[in-house]
Image (spheres, helix red, strand yellow):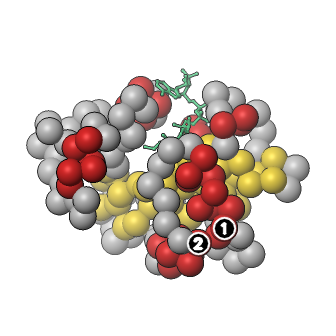
Amino acid sequence: MKVDITYSCAGINWTTITAILKQVGMAHHAPDEHRKAFEASFTTVFAWNKGQLVGFGRAISDGVYQAAVYDVAVVPEFQGQGVGSAIMKHLLKTLPQCNVILYASPGKEGFYTTLSFKKMKTGMALFKNGAAMTERGFTD
Ligand SMILES: CC(C)(COP(=O)(O)OP(=O)(O)OC[C@H]1O[C@@H](n2cnc3c(N)ncnc32)[C@H](O)[C@@H]1OP(=O)(O)O)[C@@H](O)C(=O)NCCC(=O)NCCS
């Protein structure tokens, strides 16, 4: 489906960001925490259908050769229609020279495979809530 893409954080309703992340089962924080995280990101992408926010994603980066993607989410009714893929393509377009890493939610790896991402053999993470991340299937 065709969505309108915007990049600016201006005018975003951060309560909606929290609500969508919660709705899709991803880590979520207080609205103002998301505002800080998105505003501090190198690229933010928001996808809209008739004025409704239907998905988003963000990348942190040095803008030169390294980047990491976070918080990619699509509202359930709009999943499976190319919205996530459009968000990722717009994010990646702003990072043409960068290696890009991310960690997929368990079960979502296939989505990133369609975008040519490969599984990392030596990825390491120091999570704040390590036990919960193990419980949720992110780490051994
Ligand atoms: C994962 C997510 C972002 C994908 O967005 P989407 O809009 O549903 O995906 P798209 O319709 O753009 O799919 C693009 C391609 O990925 C594939 N794909 C999507 N989800 C997949 C999955 N879980 N496993 C395997 N392939 C998947 C689609 O079949 C499609 O393949 P195609 O190009 O060959 O047709 C979305 O489903 C979502 O928000 N899920 C809940 C939150 C989440 O887990 N986010 C990811 C955090 S890492």
Along the horizontal axis of the image, is 112 left or right of 65?
right
Q: Which residue is mark 2?
A: 31
Amino acid marked by disc 1: Thr
The local secondary structure at tag 1 comes to: helix
CB under 8 Å between callouts 1 and 2? yes
- SS at mark 2 in the image: helix
Residue at far right of view: 50
* Disc 1/disc 2 C-alpha distance (Å): 5 Å
Name which residue lies at 85% across and 56% down. 51
Q: Is residue 25 above or below residue 13?
A: above
Q: Is residue 90 visible?
A: no
The numbered disc on residue 4 is none
Q: Farthest residue in the left direction?
A: 122
Q: Position of residue 137 (x, y in %)?
A: 28, 37
Q: Which mark is residue 15?
A: 1
Residue 114, horizontal then vertical, whole percent: 46, 27
In this view, the residue in front, 75 or 51, is 75
